[in-house]
Image (cartoon, grey):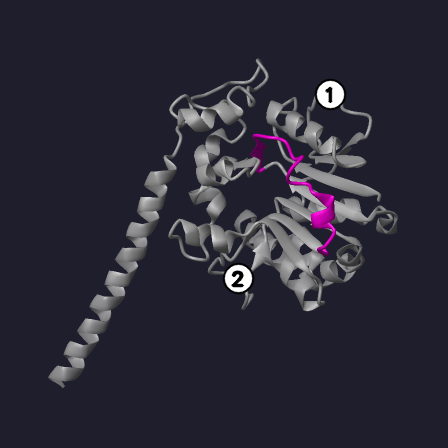
């Protein structure tokens, strides 16, 4: 079985953050080829494993653009499996238990976690998708990629200049669109974490994003990733030191694994308490329900007065 992994990374620094190095190193233990797709810049060369190759691509079309640009230049018929991974997570464990190839090969398209989340701008009737930060495509899915890229409107995505519009297009057409396209072709999909079952266990609705709201619970279940956006401010996304206020019993899983190279500012990370986030989520849900009830009651009063 010949497999390849594309790891997509964007950074404005002059060297790769430690969390990227560790993530790529772990991937190199499980994939025969790892291509680190990064933006051209002032990156200082780094010694990687022999099966890791650094490939520079302009930051056009976000993750979608880099994936398309690279895959457009290779013969995918040489591979049995294609993994696509990005840098939006910290790797806090190893991938040994997750990458069970006997289990993964049962599916044409596999992801580390799925989702039913649907943004308001999505054009899809069914929003079910495998989250795009860690995907593995089998031969059948790989063979459909050419058609998928055409249907997704690759030229429109690659030429979009507005950052917000581009982000929405990529989420709708790539994040959700890839899974929905493969399902429409009769392919079989699966995931390591079933978000429906997981959300139900903790009282969240089907469309809630477990990687943001239940990251601690995911870790306890053996999930090896920690979503960076879930715990740090957007302005500190490249800072990888974990704050001491994070729960001690969870800290032991990854304490000290994300220390940034010494020449970069550490900054102070303000962690969001995930229990507060869940309470806020439930409050907003209750507030919306109350608002609907008030509106319905008001309509009944209007009609009764008439």
**Residue 240 in sight from this viewpoint:** no
- On screen, residue 229 versus residue 30, left or right, reads left
* Quadrant in the picture for residue 232: top left
- On screen, residue 186 versus residue 139, left or right, reads left
Q: Quadrant of the C terminus?
A: bottom left
Q: Are marks 1 and 2 in contact (CB under 8 Å)?
A: no
Q: Dot 1: what SS?
A: loop
Mark nearer the N terminus (1 vs 2): 1
- On screen, residue 153 versus residue 260, left or right, reads right
x then y, percent, for residue 203: 37, 52
Seen from this angle, which residue lies furthest top?
A: 262
Please tell me how crowded label 2 is: few (under 14), some (14-19), or many (20+) other residues with Cα within 10 Å.
some
Which residue carries the number 2 mark?
122
Seen from this angle, which residue lies furthest left?
A: 305
Q: Is residue 241 above or below residue 153?
A: above
**Residue 266 in sight from this viewpoint:** yes
x then y, percent, for residue 134: 64, 44
Q: Is residue 139 above or below residue 87?
A: below
x then y, percent, for residue 269: 43, 26
Q: Main secondary structure of the magenta part?
A: loop
Q: Quadrant of the N terminus?
A: top right
Q: Nearer the viewer, residue 176 or 25?
A: 25
Count of numbered badges drawn on the protein: 2
Whether 231 is among the magenta residues is: no
- On screen, residue 199 versus residue 273, left or right, reads right
* Residue at x-position 74% and y-position 35%: 30
Please tell me how crowded label 1 is: few (under 14), some (14-19), or many (20+) other residues with Cα within 10 Å.
few
Which residue carries the number 1 mark?
46
* Residue at x-position 72% and y-position 60%: 148
Specify start and end residues of the magenta stretch as a single range.
88-108
Seen from this angle, which residue lies furthest bottom?
A: 306
């Amino acid at each position: 079985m010949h497999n390849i992994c594309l790891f997509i990374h964007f950074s404005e620094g002059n060297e790769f953050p430690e969390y990227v190095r560790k993530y790529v190193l772990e991937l190199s233990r499980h994939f025969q080829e790892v291509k680190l797709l990064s933006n051209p810049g002032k990156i200082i060369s780094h010694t990687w494993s022999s099966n890791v190759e650094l490939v520079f691509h302009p930051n056009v079309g976000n993750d979608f653009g880099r994936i398309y640009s690279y895959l457009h230049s290779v013969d995918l018929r040489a591979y049995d499996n294609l993994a696509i991974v990005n840098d939006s997570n910290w790797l806090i464990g190893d991938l040994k238990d997750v990458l069970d190839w006997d289990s993964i090969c049962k599916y044409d398209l596999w992801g580390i976690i799925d989702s039913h989340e649907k943004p308001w701008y999505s054009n899809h009737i069914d929003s079910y998708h495998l989250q795009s930060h860690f995907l593995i495509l089998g031969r059948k899915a790989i063979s459909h990629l050419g058609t998928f890229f055409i249907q997704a409107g690759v030229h429109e995505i690659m030429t979009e200049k507005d950052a917000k519009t581009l982000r929405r297009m990529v989420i709708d057409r790539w994040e959700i669109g890839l899974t929905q396209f493969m399902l429409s072709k009769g392919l079989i999909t699966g995931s390591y974490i079933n978000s429906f079952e997981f959300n139900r266990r903790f009282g969240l609705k089907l469309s809630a994003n477990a990687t943001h709201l239940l990251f601690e619970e995911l870790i306890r279940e053996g999930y090896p990733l920690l979503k960076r956006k879930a715990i740090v401010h957007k302005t500190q996304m490249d800072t990888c030191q974990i704050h001491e206020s994070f729960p001690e019993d969870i800290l032991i899983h990854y304490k000290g694994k994300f220390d940034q190279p010494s020449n970069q500012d550490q900054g102070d990370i303000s962690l969001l308490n995930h229990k507060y986030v869940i309470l806020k989520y439930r409050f907003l849900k209750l507030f919306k329900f109350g608002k609907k009830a008030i509106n319905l009651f008001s309509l009944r009063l209007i009609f009764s007065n008439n």
